[in-house]
């Protein structure tokens, strides 16, 4: 069975500081991995995805993530936080080649950015 | 392109009532998935519809049912509402898996319907 674990339900950083949001996955087959962002009272927006091509994935708004098979991790980073990055972030896994592309989400990490 | 649209935006019901939520997929998409996001939790997969049939179902009781219409829009129905059904219900659309490159098969989410059960 597939699952994702997000370490840290709340992360607080200062504006301009490095953002690191952690995600570990469990999958018996090669996974597709995703990071979504959710602003208050809104739906989910895709930040980036890993689909077995390059292990370092660049997304929107300056975010990137690195797929590390040996560590079963897909951590999200951004070199310099901006106030507008304050939101909730979800890591998700999907089964490659499965009958559906359903997503299995982690419990989310709420990012606060302090001025 | 209007993207994925959902209606209504907010809904308040009482225990035991029934509710219907609606979703229109992004143009060119024919697969619709529904997710439930309880407060403080990640979204959980309810089911997915393709070609007007339920293709896969998550761990939700039969009180949750759905429908897909020939124009690919979809409805989520919940009967005998419980307090625990209060959540944000998200609809996501995508192209059919058997078309195109699987790595490009991305789900696009709508803004959600906030259901409150009193």
Image: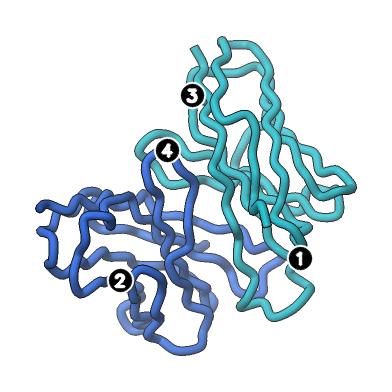
Q: Which residue is mark 4?
A: A41
Are the residues under badges 4 and 2 in a single subunit? yes
> Chain under label 4?
A
Image location (x, y in percent) of residue B40: 35, 38
In the rendered image, which residue does mark 1 sit on?
B96
Q: Nearest to the eye among marks 4 and 1: give it.
A: 4
* Front-most of residues A57 and A107: A57
Q: Name the disc covering residue B84, or none.
A: 3
The image quadrant of residue A62 is bottom left
In percent of width and height, residue B81 lies at: 60, 18
In the displayed orientation, state which residue is furthest to the bottom.
A54
For chain A, the rendered hue is: blue
Chain shown cyan: that is B
Same chain for the residues at labels 4 and 1, yes or no?
Answer: no
Marks 3 and 2 sit apart, C-alpha to C-alpha, by: 32 Å
**Is disc 1 surrounded by few (<14), some (14 to 19) or many (20+) residues within 10 Å?**
some
Q: What is the chain letter for disc 1? A: B
Task: Count all numbered tags in the image, as a single digit.
Answer: 4
Secondary element under disc 4, as helix, strand or loop, is loop
Helix, strand or loop status at disc 2: strand
Q: Residues within 10 Å of mark 2 (few under 14, many from 20)?
A: some
- Pointer 3 with pointer 4, Cβ within 8 A: no
Q: Which residue in the rendered view is the most extreme toward the front?
A: B1
| CA gap, disc 4 and disc 1 | 28 Å
Picture residue at 30% right of the left edge, 79% below the top = A71
According to the image, label 2 marks what residue?
Answer: A75
N-terminal label among 1 and 3: 3
Tell us which disc is closer to us: 1 or 3: 1
């Amino acid at each position: 069975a597939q699952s994702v674990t997000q370490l840290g339900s709340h992360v607080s950083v200062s504006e301009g500081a490095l953002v690191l949001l952690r995600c570990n996955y469990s999958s018996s087959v090669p996974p597709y991995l995703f990071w979504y962002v959710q602003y208050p009272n809104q739906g989910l927006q895709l930040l980036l995805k890993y689909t077995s091509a390059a292990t370092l994935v660049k997304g929107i708004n300056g975010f990137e993530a690195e797929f590390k098979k040996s560590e079963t991790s897909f951590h999200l980073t951004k070199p310099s936080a901006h106030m507008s990055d304050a939101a909730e972030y979800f890591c998700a896994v999907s089964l490659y080649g499965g009958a559906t592309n359903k997503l299995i989400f982690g419990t989310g990490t709420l990012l606060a950015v302090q001025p | 392109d209007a993207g994925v649209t959902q209606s209504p935006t907010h809904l308040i019901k009482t225990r035991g009532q029934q509710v219907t939520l609606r979703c229109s997929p992004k143009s060119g998409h024919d697969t619709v998935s529904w997710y439930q996001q309880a407060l403080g939790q990640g979204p959980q997969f309810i089911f997915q519809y393709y070609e007007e049939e339920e293709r896969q179902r998550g761990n939700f009781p039969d009180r949750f049912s759905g429908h897909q219409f020939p124009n690919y829009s979809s409805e989520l129905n919940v009967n005998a509402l419980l307090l625990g059904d209060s959540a944000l219900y998200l609809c996501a659309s995508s192209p059919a898996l058997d078309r195109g490159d699987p790595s490009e098969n991305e789900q696009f989410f709508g803004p959600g319907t906030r259901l409150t059960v009193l």
